[in-house]
Amino acid sequence: MANVCSAGLDIGFASLSYAQIGFLGIVQGITELLPISSTAHMRIVPAFLGWHDPGSAFSAAMQLAALAAVISYFRRDVSAVTGGSLAAWRRRDFSDPMFKLAVAIILATIPIGIAGLALSHVLNACGSPLRSLSVIGWSCIVMALLLALSELVCRHRRSVDQMRLRDALIVGLAQVGALIPGVSRSGSTLTAALFLNFRREEAARFSFLLGLPAIALAGLKELAVLLHAHIPLEAWGVLLFGLAVASVSAFAAIWGLMKFLERFSTWPFIIYRAVLGVFLLFAVSRGWLQ
């Protein structure tokens, strides 16, 4: 069995087989873009099946699969924001909607960038306390309550075209919560956008577009960390295989989520998170899971 630590970095995925990584890749791809926390499921599923924890490095690097899925699904939006903002910059039209959206995306990325760098030594450490199942259980419950509150008290009438820089900063600050396993990046940003009265499908679109830089930076940073950690060659093989599998499942997840939110509320995700959180706390208290 491969060593699960390299230079203090948690690389439990190196001890897993291609079949196990393929299965986790499917789970990662689906849960990364649904508001139910991929990091939580990367702890829960291996613990339930008796496998090694693949580690936070695996979860972070696998975000590149979500990046590929989001860019592919929202390719028109990404192209419009990129091309439109550059064109607006050249003609000094800083009131252009695409330029304002690009600035908003950059602004929303700053909080999680700072927090991620400050906490990286804790998040990626072997045996990090933040990856305990108890922490994940409580995170699931708290986020379920917040998402439920957003459904009950908010009007859900706004579109991304009505976004202000203040909205972007609020959603960006909410994104910092995703560093805690169980919170979920898509869940925290979706909840914040719903509290700002965005329509459900527009809140999801807002969440994904604002999350693109954060997802890219987290994934690329983790790849750089793994390179400097000199992990075994076979570990790179299973990681790349997991990325390929996760990319396909992530695209399916984002397609399904957007179609779902056009017609329904987020209550199924709220109930799932609440039940999962309660089960985890109960299972840990009874010694069923560690």
Image: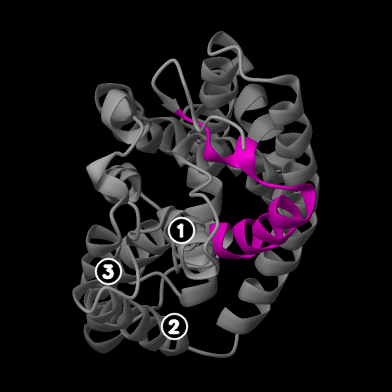
Q: Describe the element under mark 2 as helix, strand or loop.
A: loop
Residue 35 included in the magenta stretch of the image:
no
Towards the viewer: 235 or 286: 286
Which of marks 1 and 3 precedes in the sequence?
3
* Colour style of the rendered protein structure: one colour
Q: Which amino acid, mark 1?
A: Ser
The residue that appears at 45% across and 54% down in the rendered structure is 39
Residue at 44% over, 57% down: 43
Secondary structure under the numbered disc 3 in the rendered image: helix
Of the 4 image quadrants, the one containing the C terminus is bottom left
> Which residue sits at x=57%, y=20%?
226
Q: Which residues are magenta?
A: 10-32
Magenta stretch, main secondary structure, is: helix
Give the amino acid type for the residue marked by disc 3 in the picture.
Answer: Gly
Q: Is residue 78 left or right of residue 220?
A: right
Residue picked out by circle 1? 186
Measure how far apart labels 3 and 1 are at the Cα level.
17 Å
Q: Are marks 2 and 1 in contact (CB under 8 Å)?
A: no
Q: Is residue 225 above or below residue 16?
A: above
Please determine whether, in this image, residue 162 is positioned above or below residue 79.
below
Which residue is more in the foreground, 247 or 207?
Answer: 247
Q: Nearer the viewer, mark 3 or mark 2?
A: 3
